[in-house]
Image (cartoon, rainbow, N blue to C red):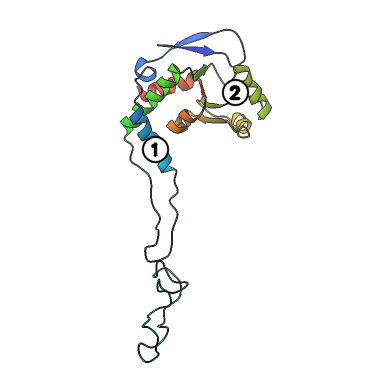
Amino acid sequence: MKLSIISATGSDKKSEIQVSDEVFGARYNESLVHQIVVAYQAGKRRGTRAQKTRAAVRGGGAKPWRQKGTGHARAGTIRSPIWRGGGRVFAAENHDFSQKVNKKMHRRAVRAILSELIRQERLVTVDNFKVDTPKTKQLSEKLKMLGIDDALIVTEDVGQELYLSARNLAKVYVCDVNHVDPVRLLQHEKVVMTVSAVKQFEERLA
């Protein structure tokens, strides 16, 4: 199949690039994409909620009073769960929410997402995408020229100028091919991808 290439400079000159049908013409597997997206979102959870058991609470080494003759109930430590300031009975522990994702499943899901983006006309292929200076206004005007305000920009190498220009735009995110994940591909209205990035995707997902 062929993808139309738009000039990032606003020129009317158009060209095409031949890409693999296996990568950019795959069938959309909704259940697989959903599984991969859930796995990625679960992997971002920190899972650092934690509480202390009676063994982790500081103090309480000495028996508060003798076993018999005081009239009080028997007690061995002031850090007992029934005491104020004591530990929790069923304390929450650090939890790893990550899910295992097979490489083949990941590649199939990314192929399905890229193919669906093309069918929905949400994938925009440009010859190159660079800014001369780290200016948000310059990048904003460049996207406005393409008629885009919500975009994931994927290049072969994210320069410092492009990164600094995009970080103040709420609906714009810039990354290279190595750091693209399925969630990013789906959450933006448009995906702007350079020709070299398309070729890298084709080599990796073939």
Quadrant in the picture for residue 90: bottom left
What's the amino acid at mark 1? Val
Q: Which residue is nearer to you in this view: 103 or 46?
A: 46
**In the rendered image, which quarter contains the C terminus?**
top left
Q: Residue at x 37, y 17 (%)?
A: 25
- For the residues bearing labels 1 and 2, Cβ distance under 8 angstroms: no
Q: Residue at x 40, y 74 (%)?
A: 80
- The numbered dot on residue 142 is none
**In the rendered image, which quarter contains the N terminus?**
top left
Q: 52 left or right of 144?
A: left
Q: Which residue is nearer to you in this view: 83 or 61?
A: 83
Would residue 135 be visible to someone looking at this image?
no
Measured in 3D between alpha carbons, the distance from the residue under mark 1 to the one under mark 2, in whole angstroms, is 33 Å
153 in relation to 85, above or below? above
Quadrant in the picture for residue 75: bottom left
89 in relation to 205, above or below? below
Q: 13 left or right of 82?
A: right
- Label 2: which secondary element: loop
- The numbered dot on residue 38 is 1
Outermost residue, bottom direction? Answer: 69
Q: Residue at x 49, y 18 (%)?
A: 195
41 in relation to 52, above or below? above
Q: Position of residue 148 (x, y in %)?
A: 58, 21
In this figure, which residue is indicated by the disc labeled 2? 130
Would residue 117 be visible to someone looking at this image?
yes
**N-term mark: 1 or 2:** 1
Rate crowding at label 2 as few (under 14), some (14 to 19) or many (20 or more) other CA atoms within 10 Å.
some
Task: Between label 1 and label 2, give the one nearer the viewer.
Answer: 1
